Image (spheres, helix red, strand yellow):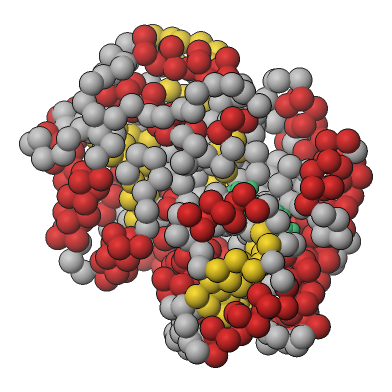
Amino acid sequence: MTEREPVRAPTGTQLTCKSWQTEAAYRMIRNNLDPRVAEDWERLVVYGGSGRAARDWASFDAISRTLQELEDDETLLVQSGKPVAVFRTHRWAPRVLIANSNLVPRYATWDYFRELELNGLIMYGQMTAGSWIYIGAQGIIQGTYETFAEAVRQECGGEARGKLIVSGGLGGMSGAQPLAATMLGSTYLGAEVDWGRIQRRLADGYIDEIETDLDRAIEKAISARTQAKPWSVIYHGNQVDLLTRLINLKVAPDLATDQTSAHDNLNGYVPHGISYEDALTLRIEDPQAYISRAMDSMAEHVCCLLELKKMGATIFDYGNNLRGQAYDAGIEDAFTYPGFVPAYIRPMFCEGRGPFRWVALSGDPEDIHRIDQVVLEAFPDNRLLARWIELARTRIPFQGLPARICWLGYGERARFAALVNDLVKRGELKAPIVVGRDHLDCGSVASPNRETEAMPDGTDAIADWPLLNALLNTASGATWVSIHHGGGVGIGNSIHAGQVTVLDGTDEMAERAQRVFTADPGLGVVRHADAGIPAAIDFARTHGIRMPMSPAPVPAAGAPPAATV
Ligand code: NAD
């Protein structure tokens, strides 16, 4: 625990740093740690188990000081959340370069990582935590909404009302699930062990009802499903207990998945069969015993999901590596159900579409509302986007600096950037806009159990793509660029990159943004075309993306998942 005052990003037009380029990084690291945004700001934990924004408070202070002094031809280097050097580069170079949690592959295990972490030498950056572009639960809510919508379209004949979605966790990302489900019109039932998290989501309007009695929670959810009522019920308890009871009562949900922090078997997932308080004590007093219980629990968790599948539920993995953990704990058929990317999201990746987001540095929600309007006018044919903006306006509260998420694709992102930079230039917005994305994007991640699962040419584990992505964004003029390891699915399982670019209304940023917002999603299309996916090959051809060697289509189903190799 720290006795620090809560962190907040400055708002308004008064600069703390020497330009908007550095001011943006200064405001965004603070925004990540704002108590309204971060899950546990005092421990510098932003979301996703132990995803941090800076290694420790001394590093946070040094980053802040350095950003205040940084010139517009200098670059700050951050190594696992600690600022290590400043070098003279040039104006178009990123102002900050970040590398978080990277280990040489042979050493990339949680045990090795945790030993280094304990000695203060490394930090887990998750994806947008250590790269300073987390925007609260809103950052995932559109992705969750689109994922559930596509699952309902494919598996439930497109009718979301009267359907029951079951999942676990109410953390930074997982907390978006109940709201996404009810926005679609479905009923949602899920468990969360941490009472504080439940209260937080209730206060933010993400959940409708809490129940401490397991059978009553299930009854309420069944009753809402019967009435086709968009309603979410949260059971205060363990997800494994909830699933076991559903099986015993022979209640099959329509869709079942999970988003507890399964990627981290020590500081994320909470095993069943032990009270939450005792689990927290065990975590500190006997980490090995805790890990062993968590692994057994995750094995049972997956067995429950497989049982629900037999009972008629559609099940899919929702990006937390629960299947990988269960497989390591001895469940050989853990990978017999699909991940959400190959099942529902990949067609969007083939068009360079992914979780793009923007933040108003002014702190004024009006700036976001003005951009909403511009986006709706600029992309009148994108029905997905129009539906989303309307829903987001009415249903999603801002956390910290006002922000918007929107899955824009290749071509749209560059056009968006030009329009918004122009709004800033004309003084129609109060201050510049920061534009970035999740690392979970089309061309920026190698993650065989998630984003690159079941690539048709078997290239799931090839990590050249995220490295090329970071190099390309650096060369194109992004404001800050990051390379991380282990986000989403845990140490040893992913390598990914991020970029953030500040639209400050200058001609220089207009040029830089055109390059970044074309190259960044363009590489996503190329990654999928190179893997032989016909839709991406066609998209690259029709959109003039230059690939020196024509890719050949490859039939689906390539190499087995990495966990089984
Ligand atoms: P978080 O750590 O903030 O929240 C997870 C929540 O799960 C916590 O509140 C925790 O108390 C609860 N929990 C843990 N074990 C439980 C159990 N057995 N029963 C009930 N509750 C339990 O993490 P988050 O930001 O919500 O992310 C959740 C997971 O999703 C992570 O593994 C993360 O890497 C992954 N993730 C997926 C995506 C995606 O797009 N699919 C995106 C971001 C993160």
- Residue at 46% across / 72% down in the picture? 182
Say left or right for 32 vs 565.
left
* Above or below, 349 relative to 11: below
Say left or right for 433 vs 538.
left
Which image quarter is the C terminus in?
bottom right
* Above or below, 416 relative to 322: above
Residue 315 appears anywhere in the view: no
Image quarter of residue 298: bottom right
Position in image of residue 490 (x %, y %): 69, 45
Front residue of this view, candidates 268 and 272: 272
Front residue of this view, candidates 376 and 330: 376
- Residue at 66% across / 75% down in the picture? 217
Position in image of residue 555 (x %, y %): 56, 71
Which image quarter is the N terminus in?
top right
Say left or right for 413 vs 549.
left
Residue 361 appears anywhere in the view: yes
- Residue at 19% across / 61% down in the picture? 376
Image quarter of residue 236: bottom right
Q: Residue furthest left?
A: 426
Position in image of residue 443 (x %, y %): 47, 49
